[in-house]
Every structure is written in structure tokens, then in C-alpha cells.
């Protein structure tokens, strides 16, 4: 089934052409990722598909039988609503049915109660509320009575994501789900859960993400937007990189041929008289086409840096017995570490574990409760925070960078100009002379990053640098950091980025404990998983014998269920026996409700139904917990 067809789309802002004459199709079941540098038109294309923007030319046809749902960077909400109320503002028939059902429990209107129950059946809404709560729980949103206005930016993003996922489950129509950077503000466990969720869900997906592991896990097609064109790559991120390299090699070969022809044709043009024949006019037109190809700029791919970094002394940075708490929450407890020259450290842990606090203590922005910090005299920190860029509204990009220095020094005695350094980070000549205020959000973040690096620090500290950065910029940044000779600390949830850059992990594991691990992020996760499995596999000390606790052994189940205690085993058996009975009771109540006209009986049956549903939900959750224990055996 075809969802979307777009033909010959063109979109410009002023003199800047975002894309020109592009065509594409989205079919049912497609899971597509869009890759492009910031400012190339990704968000604009999504808005055109949502009907929020209009293309300059071309056509977009969206199948009338589908709904298009967008998870955007900008979240609209009423700050006075609770999380639960915000979730229930969904405009879908199953949600409306669920809201009416809750109202009917406190109503005396016989007709309204009957309609509410019929609506629940018609829209298959009985399990929707449970699914909604499970999604919120996975995204670490537990206090549903909290006001939206009291939440942090990351919490708001997670609640909005939960609402979107609930909407796709609630709607039984065909859905095109559009997601713009869904993994921002999610920790690794949440990202992995979302990967699994999207993989299993029968949805059609159009995704913008910088997380390459997430992209590879979820998507099977990549759209690359570059130089006003759209290129389609079927397969993984590695396939996209290979195809892109082949295309660029072919382009460079074409440019070389065009340069040779251009030189010859330029000489001919100079010799031509002013009066030209039709034949010569055709050749002149061809000359200008050749000139256009010959002057294609591919320099952004070819810049190499050989740093002349500011000298590092013998002492880098040493932390001794650092403690830090906020109220009863312990973030750092007796933490000591001596940073070495050239060390690239990744800091990982759940949101709120204390990672950013450690960065602030290192730089003196925040005081430790206890302990000592010794910083080498030659250390020059470069700190990329999540706060964003400070600039004058009318200041041009090139002037902003030149405030730091006119040139960036290289080890061979040469240097890069501010303009060349900007080009390295994908700012073309036109953008360099544009006001900073005209840049997209992602371009401003890229400029902020470049501004830090251009100051030539010898100790870099990055707090979530990959959020809102595009993949081309991340590739340039990775190349830069791999060549970087100084010390480096990165806080990031981007698994691919961490694996490419860091060789040492400091893991915040809660209650002030920080694990020191030598290796990259994936190696740490693998070691942590094995460690957790070993701890859970330790056999508990047997209980003293009595007639109520003595287990009976079943040889067929010994290996499968060896990790459950006798009490848990009996609980599992009781649940597995009781759930079908509850399901049968629920079905009988529903049948009675459908055939009952007496108001008092309907009211009692409705209360019974709610009670049975709550018991079922409780049994299902406990059954899942016990099955998870078994699955880890």
C-alpha cells in the first residue's frame, strides 16, 4: 500500500535552495532514516509532509486512508495539566472511549453508560490504559499527577514520546510515524527499549536521528539529502557510507575531466569574436555547464589536520577522595582519579546520576563537599555544554569565529584560516557570511562546537555533544577527536560515538559508586551484563525445612526454573492458573453488560469489570516479572 508519493519537490528560503526537483515514495512497512547536515532541509521536508509548509513547486499526495503523526523537537503543552491529563488529550476514538468509560463509572445516566461500554468494545480500548502506563514506566515517568509545567525539558520530551507511541497503538488506521531525533534526552536503557519497541511495532516510519546504532537497528532504508538532491540507499548505515564514497569518487573523476575540458574551452571562449553563430552558441552553453561541474567544491571532504596543541605539562588533573551529595542523594563518594596525557574517557550512567555535576566540579563551577582537586598549570579546558551559544543577533558566522583568532595553527608551521576551519565543519562560503540568527538550531550547535575547538584547548570536556548534531558533522567531529593529542572527557548516550572515540569508561552506577573500566562503551556494557548475570545466578541459602516450605522437584523444570524460590514458583503457578479464570470472568461480565438494560445491574457489573481488569493487570505485571527472572537463567 502506497502511503506517500512526492514528485519534483523544490523548496527555497530566499536565495538558499534547500532541495530541488526531488521525488520519493513511502510504502507501508517502510522504515526510513533521513541523513543530512543541518540546514539541508530535513525539518522542512517533514513539515511539508505534515502540511505545515508548502513546497515552491512539485506535488505531494498522501493516501486518504492513513494518518500522519509527528514527534517534533518542539513540544506544545498546557503547563497546568497533569501528565495523566496531558496523555488523555489524545484525539483518537479509543482514547475518547476510554475517557467516556471513566466518566460512566460516576454517572447515573443509563444511556451514557451503555454508550460508553459499547464504545470500549467497538474501539478495543480495554487494554489501552494499561499499555499507556507501561510505555510511561519504560520511559521512567512514574508520577502521573505531576504538572507538566514542573517537568524538566528531558521529562517533557519523554512524556511527549509516550503520548505519541500511545497514539499509534490507539489508532487502528494505517499510520505514518515521523520522528525527529527521538533518542535525545533518553538514557541507554530507554534507547534500547525504544529500538525494540519500534522493531516489533507494525508501523511505517520516517526517522531523523544522529544515533547510528539506533538507525541500523530500526531502519532498512536511508535517504541522504545533499547538494539539493535526495539519494536513496537500501540497507545499513555501512551500505550508505559505501555508496556515498563511490558517488563522491565518481564525482571527483567527473570534476577532473571537466577541469581538463574547461581549460581548453576557456581558451576557445577567449578567442571567439562577439558575433557568434548558432553552432558556437551551443558550444558556449556547453562551456558554462562544464564550468559549473569543474568548479564544484569538494574541499570539505579533503581537509586534514595536524594539530599544534598547546603544551601539556607533567601534571594533568587529579581528583582525590571527592564526595558530593544533594540532600540525601549521594552522587560522588570517595572518588579518586588521576587523568593522563592523551586519555579519552567516556562517562556513562542514568540521567540524574551526577555526570554533569562531576564535570562542573572538575572545572571549578561547583564545589565538592569533601576532597581535593589538583589541575596542571598548563591545562586549558574547552567545555562544550548543553546551554547553547551566546552571540549578537546580527553578528556574521565568520566574524564570530575571527573573534577567537584569524588562523588555527598546524604542527607543520602552516595554519588554517577561520574560513577554512569553518569549511571543515561544513559551513559553506554563503553560510559563513550569514547572520548567526539565521542559522538552524542544529547549525548553531555545530558553530558552538566549532567555536570551542577553534580555541585550541588541550583538555576537552563534552557534555552530550551529539544531541541535535547531524551525522555529517559527527563524522567530522569523530575524525577531529581521533587525531586530538590532548585529554578528553565525554558524557554521552550515543553508543556508536562513544565506541569510536573513548578507550576508558567511568560508569556512574548509583549511590556514589563509579566503576573504572578500561575499554570502549560496548565492551563495558558486555562486561556489565555478564557481571549482573553472575550476581543473579548466585544460589540463595536454602530456607530451614518445614512442611510449608519444602519444595517438590520436577526434573523437567529444574533447569528452566532453578532461579525461582519455592515461594515464587508457587506464586507463578497460582497466577498461571488464575489468569484464564479471570479472563473468563471478564468475558462473562462483558457478555452480561451487552445484554443488560437494568441500570442498577449495569452499575454493579461495571464495578465488577473494573475490579477484574485491575486484578488481571496486577497478575500480568507480576507474571512478566517472574518470567524475566526465568529468562535470565
Image (tube, rainbow, N blue to C red):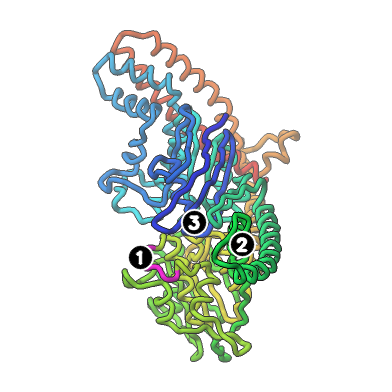
On the image, numbered disc 1 is attached to which residue? 437
- The residue at the point 40 percent across, 55 percent down is 13
Please tell me in which quadrant of the rendered image residue 253 appears.
bottom right
Q: Which residues are magenta?
A: 432-438
Q: Is residue 519 left or right of residue 156?
A: right
Q: Residue furthest front?
A: 275
Mark before the other along the chain sequence, 1 or 3: 3
Q: Residue at x 62, y 69 (%)?
A: 266
Q: Are marks 2 and 1 in contact (CB under 8 Å)?
A: no
For marks 1 and 3, give the CA distance.
17 Å
Reading the chain from its start, which is encountered first: label 2 or label 1?
Answer: 2
Foreground pick, 612 / 80: 80
Screen quadrant of the N terminus: top right
Instruction: Note whether 619 is above or below 580 in the view shown.
Output: below
Q: Can you identify the residue that label 2 sits on?
A: 287
Q: Report helix, strand or loop for mark 2.
A: helix
Q: Nearer the viewer, residue 352 or 287?
A: 287
The answer to whether residue 436 is magenta is: yes
Mark 2 vs mark 3, CA separation in Å: 29 Å
**Identity of the residue drawn at 49% across and 22% down:** 582
What percent of the width, then of the height, locates residue 397? 41, 72
Answer few, some or many: residues within 10 Å of disc 1's Cα (few below 14, many 20 plus, some between 14 and 19). Answer: some
Where disc 3 sits, the SS reads loop
Q: Judge left or right: residue 140 versus residue 533.
A: left
Q: Are marks 2 and 3 in contact (CB under 8 Å)?
A: no
- Going from N to C along the chain, the mark reached first, 2 or 3, is 3
Provide residue 205's location: percent of width, then percent of height: 54, 41
Q: Which residue is mark 3?
A: 40
Residue at image coords 33%, 12%: 601
Amino acid at each position: 500500500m502506497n502511503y506517500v508519493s512526492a514528485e519534483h519537490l523544490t523548496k527555497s528560503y530566499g536565495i538558499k535552495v534547500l532541495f530541488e526537483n526531488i521525488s520519493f515514495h513511502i510504502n507501508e512497512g517502510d522504515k526510513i532514516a533521513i541523513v543530512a547536515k543541518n540546514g539541508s532541509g530535513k525539518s522542512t521536508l517533514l513539515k511539508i509532509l505534515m502540511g505545515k509548509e508548502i513546497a515552491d513547486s512539485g506535488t505531494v499526495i498522501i493516501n486518504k486512508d492513513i494518518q500522519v503523526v509527528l514527534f517534533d523537537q518542539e513540544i506544545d503543552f498546557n503547563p497546568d495539566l497533569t501528565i495523566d491529563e496531558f496523555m488523555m488529550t489524545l484525539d483518537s476514538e479509543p482514547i475518547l472511549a476510554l475517557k467516556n468509560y471513566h466518566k460512566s463509572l460516576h454517572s447515573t445516566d443509563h444511556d451514557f453508560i451503555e454508550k460508553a461500554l459499547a464504545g470500549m468494545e467497538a474501539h478495543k480500548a480495554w487494554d489501552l490504559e494499561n499499555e499507556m502506563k507501561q510505555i510511561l514506566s519504560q520511559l521512567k515517568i512514574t508520577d502521573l499527577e505531576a504538572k507538566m509545567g514542573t517537568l524538566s525539558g528531558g521529562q517533557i520530551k519523554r512524556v511527549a514520546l509516550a503520548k505519541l507511541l500511545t497514539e499509534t497503538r490507539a489508532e487502528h488506521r494505517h499510520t505514518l510515524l515521523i520522528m525527529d531525533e527521538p533518542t535525545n534526552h533518553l538514557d541507554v536503557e530507554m534507547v534500547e527499549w525504544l529500538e525494540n519497541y519500534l522493531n516489533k511495532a507494525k508501523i511505517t516510519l520516517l526517522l531523523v536521528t544522529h544515533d547510528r546504532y539506533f538507525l541500523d537497528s530500526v531502519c532498512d532504508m536511508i535517504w541522504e539529502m545533499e547538494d539539493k538532491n535526495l539519494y536513496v540507499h537500501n540497507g545499513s548505515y555501512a551500505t550508505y557510507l559505501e555508496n556515498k564514497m563511490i558517488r563522491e569518487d565518481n564525482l571527483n573523476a567527473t570534476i577532473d575531466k571537466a577541469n581538463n575540458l574547461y581549460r581548453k574551452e576557456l581558451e576557445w571562449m577567449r578567442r571567439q569574436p562577439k558575433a557568434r553563430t548558432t553552432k558556437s552558441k551551443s558550444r558556449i552553453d556547453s562551456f558554462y555547464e562544464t564550468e559549473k561541474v569543474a568548479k564544484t567544491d569538494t574541499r570539505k571532504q579533503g581537509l586534514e589536520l595536524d594539530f599544534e596543541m598547546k603544551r601539556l605539562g607533567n601534571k594533568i588533573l587529579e581528583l582525590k577522595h571527592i564526595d558530593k551529595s544533594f540532600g540525601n542523594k549521594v552522587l560522588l563518594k570517595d572518588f579518586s582519579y588521576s587523568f593522563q596525557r592523551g586519555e579519552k574517557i567516556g562517562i556513562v550512567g542514568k540521567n540524574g546520576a551526577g555526570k554533569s555535576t562531576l564535570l562542573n566540579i572538575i572545572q571549578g563551577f561547583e564545589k565538592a563537599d569533601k576532597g581535593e582537586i589538583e589541575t596542571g598549570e598548563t591545562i586549558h579546558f574547552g567545555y562544550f555544554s548543553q546551554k547553547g551559544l551566546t552571540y549578537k543577533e546580527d553578528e556574521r558566522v565568520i566574524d564570530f569565529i575571527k573573534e577567537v583568532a584569524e588562523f588555527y595553527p598546524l604542527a607543520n608551521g602552516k595554519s588554517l584560516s577561520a574560513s577554512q576551519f569553518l569549511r571543515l565543519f561544513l559551513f559553506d562560503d554563503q553560510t559563513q557570511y550569514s547572520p548567526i540568527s539565521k542559522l538552524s538550531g542544529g547549525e548553531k550547535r555545530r558553530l558552538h562546537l566549532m567555536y570551542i575547538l577553534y580555541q585550541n584547548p588541550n583538555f576537552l570536556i563534552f557534555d552530550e555533544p551529539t544531541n541535535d548534531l547531524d551525522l555529517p558533522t559527527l563524522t567530522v567531529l569523530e575524525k577531529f577527536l581521533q587525531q586530538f593529542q590532548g585529554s578528553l572527557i565525554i558524557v554521552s548516550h550515543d553508543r556508536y560515538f562513544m565506541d569510536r572515540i573513548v578507550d576508558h569508561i567511568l560508569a556512574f552506577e548509583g549511590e556514589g559508586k563509579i566503576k573504572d573500566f578500561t575499554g570502549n562503551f560496548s565492551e563495558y556494557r558486555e562486561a556489565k551484563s555478564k557481571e549482573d548475570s553472575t550476581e543473579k545466578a548466585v544460589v540463595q541459602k536454602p530456607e530451614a525445612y518445614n512442611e510449608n516450605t519444602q519444595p517438590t522437584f520436577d526434573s523437567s523444570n529444574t533447569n528452566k526454573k532453578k532461579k525461582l524460590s519455592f515461594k515464587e514458583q508457587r506464586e507463578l503457578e497460582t497466577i498461571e492458573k488464575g489468569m484464564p479464570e479471570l479472563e473468563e470472568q471478564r468475558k462473562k461480565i462483558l457478555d452480561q453488560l451487552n445484554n443488560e438494560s437494568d441500570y442498577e445491574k449495569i452499575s454493579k457489573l461495571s464495578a465488577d469489570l473494573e475490579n477484574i481488569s485491575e486484578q488481571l493487570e496486577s497478575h500480568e505485571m507480576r507474571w512478566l516479572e517472574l518470567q524475566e527472572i526465568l529468562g535470565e537463567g
